[in-house]
Amino acid sequence: LKQLLARLGGSALKKWSQNFLIDGNILKKILLFSQIHKEDHVLEIGPGPGALTEFLLQNAQEVFAVEIDPLWAKALEELHIPEGHKLHIFLQDALTLDLETLPLKRKIQVVANLPYHITTPLLAKLLPLHKKIHSLTVMVQKEFKERMCAKPGTKQWNSFALFLQFYGDIEPGFTVPASCFFPPPKVDSSVIRIVLKAPPLSHSTELFFSLVRTAFNQRRKMLRVSLKKMIPLEEIDRILDHMGCPISIRPEQLSLAQFIQFFMLMKKEVKD
């Protein structure tokens, strides 16, 4: 990698969170964990010098590589492409990518070492696309992975974990030490797989997540206090009583199913 950087006159850029994976064993583990098959179409985000891209090309029919750095987008053209396989290179910000522009014949699999600085907005963009994406196998900061996998009733349970479970089923993977990267980041990473699914609500999702975010903005306070500017207190109390929940319950104590139940009862109260 250092020789390639020297030949191209490039470097790892902090502004794009460029920490390149250099451990071949980890690359093999990612490929195995992603459950990629030879007929699959794969979207890779931020491929950099293409170490993971090469593995993907050997095991998937087509790879769509989205790279924001012109240096690496050009370097990807030098990769060996096995006969019968295709590599499509897109020089652009992954946050602006429109999956409708990709020549897809089937649902795509996302496999990526996500740039840390865009992890949250990128997942927020991709998770609702269950009609286009089958699964996401992604590497994220270890601490962020723990937040993604948080459970109701714990201090880490948060609105983003709820958002993730709303759109997908989570399969925790494995930890990747900082020493497996060049340059090494300051924290360890984790690989996680999310299989997307049709959401439990097909309508009013924007209003639902507005409710969830409002509740978690004051997660340590009682739900009735967190939501009192959004819903009258007496209405909140009636809903909680109907659900069999104490009025002292806090947002972090409610599961996804309970938040949905609360939301549906709230909508019914408005209609009545």
Image (tube, grey):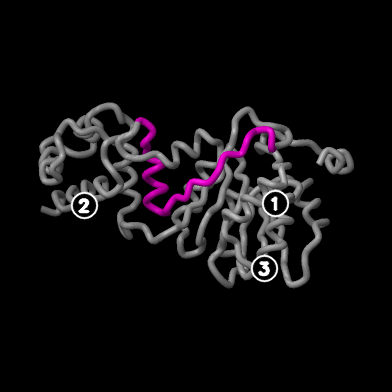
- Label ID, residue 61: 3
Mark 2 to mark 3 CA distance (whole Å): 43 Å
Determine contact: label 1, label 3, CB under 8 Å. Answer: no
The stretch of residues the image draws in magenta is 155-180
* Residue 182 occupies quadrant: top right
- Label disc, if present, on residue 264 of the rendered structure: 2
Task: Identify the amino acid type marked 1.
Answer: Leu
Secondary structure of the residue carrying tag 1 is helix
In percent of the image, x 79 and y 36: which residue is there? Answer: 11
Name the one closer to the observer, 4 or 8.
4
Label 1 to label 3: alpha-carbon separation: 15 Å
* Label drawn at residue 231: none
Residue 227, quarter of the rendered image: top left
Query: Within 10 angstroms of label 3, few (less than 14), some, or many (20 or more) residues?
Result: many
In primary-sequence order, the first of circles 1 and 3 is 1
Residue found 11% across the figure and 41% down from its top: 241
| Residue 172 falls inside the magenta stretch | yes
Category of crowding for the residue at label 1, using alpha-carbon neighbours closer than 10 angstroms: few (below 14), some (14–19), many (at least 20): many
**176 is higher (above) or lower (below) than 38:** above
- Amino acid on which disc 2 is placed: Met
Q: What residue is shown with label 1?
A: 52
